[in-house]
Amino acid sequence: MEIILLIPIFLGFVISLFSIPFWIRKAKKFGLVGKDVNKVDKEDVAEAGGICVVIGFIIGVLSYVAIKTFYFKTNENLIEIFVLLSTILMVCFIGFIDGILGWKIGLNRKTRILFLFFASIPLIVINAGEARMMGIELGLLFPLVIIPLGIIGASATFNFLAGYNGLETGQGIIILSSLSIITFIMGNTWLSIITLCMVSSLISFYVFNKYPAKVFPGDVLTYSVGALIAVIAILGNVEKIAVFFFIPYIIETGLKIRGKLKKESFAKVNEDGSLEMPYGKIYGLEHLAIYILKKIKPNKKVYEREVVYLINGFQILIIVAGFLIFKEGIFANAG
């Protein structure tokens, strides 16, 4: 690792940090806002701010390509990098349509899945990753089935665990930071740097998205982060680890299906700003967090920040467990 490789990570952070206030002003000016429903006053907050994160990420990655080309004078992994960028840009566009135009005309589930399948095509055509999983040679089954399922599943389900200030951003930072450590240990420095470009952009966004939020991420961010997790897993051959890290989202998906994908994650808000269970049953980890906090807190008062902290804490525990379970495989493949 040379110090010059910090430039792409720094660029992602700076570009996102300085573009987000501009986006907030423009979004409010043109009415691109959403209600902060977990607040008493339900203020209007700028929407789709995740576009700034994706822009910072893209510029950070392209600067990394420039450093590889002009400083290190190598084109190693450039095909994989541009395939990664192609997939993320396609998913970003789908998320933007779903989050903006979707308010008026909507993207139904089948259309969304079809579009996300198209976003997996760049990975399919280069036969990305290794077709051998758990000792089984999958052959064409891997690029034609596993890769699309990974992109579709990660993009769509990362959008499920959401709706609370800083939740989606914090989860993205935690999961992607962990994957960057793993890919670095396994010798895939290029993947680690690309992942950290997104992490640094997310950290900038978190400054404005944490409680009380000044901007919402929108589907443009959640789809892009979910897709990036899947792409990193495929290109880094760490699918099993990534799936394990995704346990909270697997649980969330199951709970959402329990509610026939119609129950919302938002809470019922009291006059003092504390939160209550919105339904008689649990239809998301957000509801489960409220339920647990009400059981363990003496005053029974639960607030939005606490829900986010508890879910993030659960995610960190899953990641620590993942490192312990898969550590032999991680270090066995150390570069």
Image (tube, helix red, strand yellow):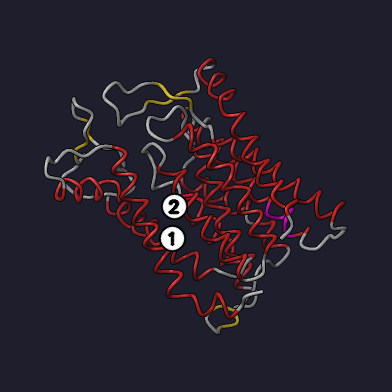
State left or right for residue 294 relative to residue 223. left
Q: Residue furthest top?
A: 29
Q: Nearer the viewer, residue 324 or 232?
A: 324
Q: Nearer the viewer, residue 315 or 262?
A: 315
Q: Residue at x 56, y 24 (%)?
A: 21
Quarter placement of the C terminus: bottom right
The location of residue 92, given as percent across then percent down, is 60, 42
State left or right for residue 183 relative to residue 257. right
Q: Residue at x 50, y 44 (%)?
A: 222
Q: Nearer the viewer, residue 17 or 278?
A: 17
Q: Which residues are magenta?
A: 80-84
In 3D space, how far apart are the residues under numbered discs 1 and 2 (Cα atoms)?
A: 9 Å
State left or right for residue 132 relative to residue 259. right
The location of residue 85, given as percent across then percent down, is 69, 50
Q: Which residue is mark 1?
A: 246
Q: Residue at x 65, y 51 (%)?
A: 87
Tell me the quarter of the picture where residue 121 sits.
Answer: bottom right
Going from the N terminus, do you reach mark 1 or mark 2 first? Answer: 2
Q: How many marks?
A: 2
Q: Does residue 211 show up magenta in the picture?
A: no
Quarter placement of the N terminus: bottom right
Q: Amino acid at mark 1?
A: Phe
Q: Amino acid at mark 2?
A: Thr
Q: Secondary structure at mark 2?
A: helix
Q: Secondary structure at mark 1?
A: loop
Q: Are marks 1 and 2 in contact (CB under 8 Å)?
A: yes
Q: Which residue is mark 2?
A: 157
